Image (cartoon, rainbow, N blue to C red):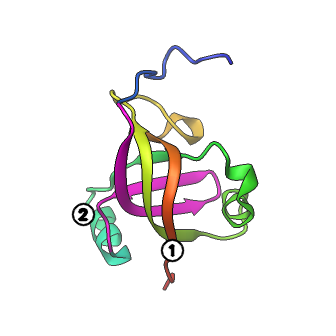
Amino acid sequence: MSRNPAICEPYGPPEKLAGMWELDLEHSTFFEGANDLREVMRAFEKGEFDYTWLNVRDIAQRPDELAAAQGAGARVYQIQLIGRRSLCASGFGHMGAYPREVLLQKLLSQEAVHLP
């Protein structure tokens, strides 16, 4: 696998994380610690939007999530996972727009959140 030297490659150890996952066309954002979609929207409005790309390598085996990632409409999930964080800020995700990344290793729970 070819690696982009501009992207930070080291990752921390696996850890349990919880929060909200927003998934849409070319968009996979993890909001660590978020429990309410309104919290996320308030942070966005204040400019405190945290861009952390959630890298789900097996998304092709997740039909609903894959459809959202390909433009079939946004989905938001409350999740718990085991993942590894990037150790430096760099260009992750779609077009390198995300300064941080979490590599999903195991999804422990996933519950759909109703969108307004």
Residue found at x 48% / y 22%: 7
Q: Where is residue 9 shown, x and y percent of the image?
A: 46, 21
Vertical order, 24 against 7 (above or below) = below
46 left or right of 72 in image: left
Q: Does the magenta segment cover residue 72?
A: no
Q: Image quadrant for the N terminus?
A: top right
Q: Which residue is mark 1?
A: 111
For the record, the magenta segment spans 13-35
Asked if the residue under mark 1 is in contact with the one under mark 2, i.e. CB atoms within 8 Å, the reply is: no
Q: Amino acid at mark 1?
A: Glu
Residue found at x 48% / y 65%: 109
- Using the rendered view, name the quadrant where residue 63 is placed: bottom right
Give the overall secondary structure of the magenta segment. strand
Residue found at x 67% / y 57%: 69
Crowding at label 2, few (<14), some or many (≥20) Cα neighbours within 10 Å?
Answer: few
Q: Amino acid at mark 2?
A: Lys
Is any atom of residue 55 visible in this view?
yes
Is any atom of residue 99 visible in this view?
no
In primary-sequence order, the first of circles 2 and 1 is 2
Q: Which residue is mark 2?
A: 46
Q: Where is residue 36 shown, x and y percent of the image?
A: 33, 76
Task: Quote the CA–CA distance across marks 2 and 1.
Answer: 27 Å
- Mark 1, secondary structure of its residue: strand
Q: Where is residue 38 shown, x and y percent of the image?
A: 33, 77
Q: Where is residue 17 shown, x and y percent of the image?
A: 35, 53
Residue found at x 54% / y 53%: 28
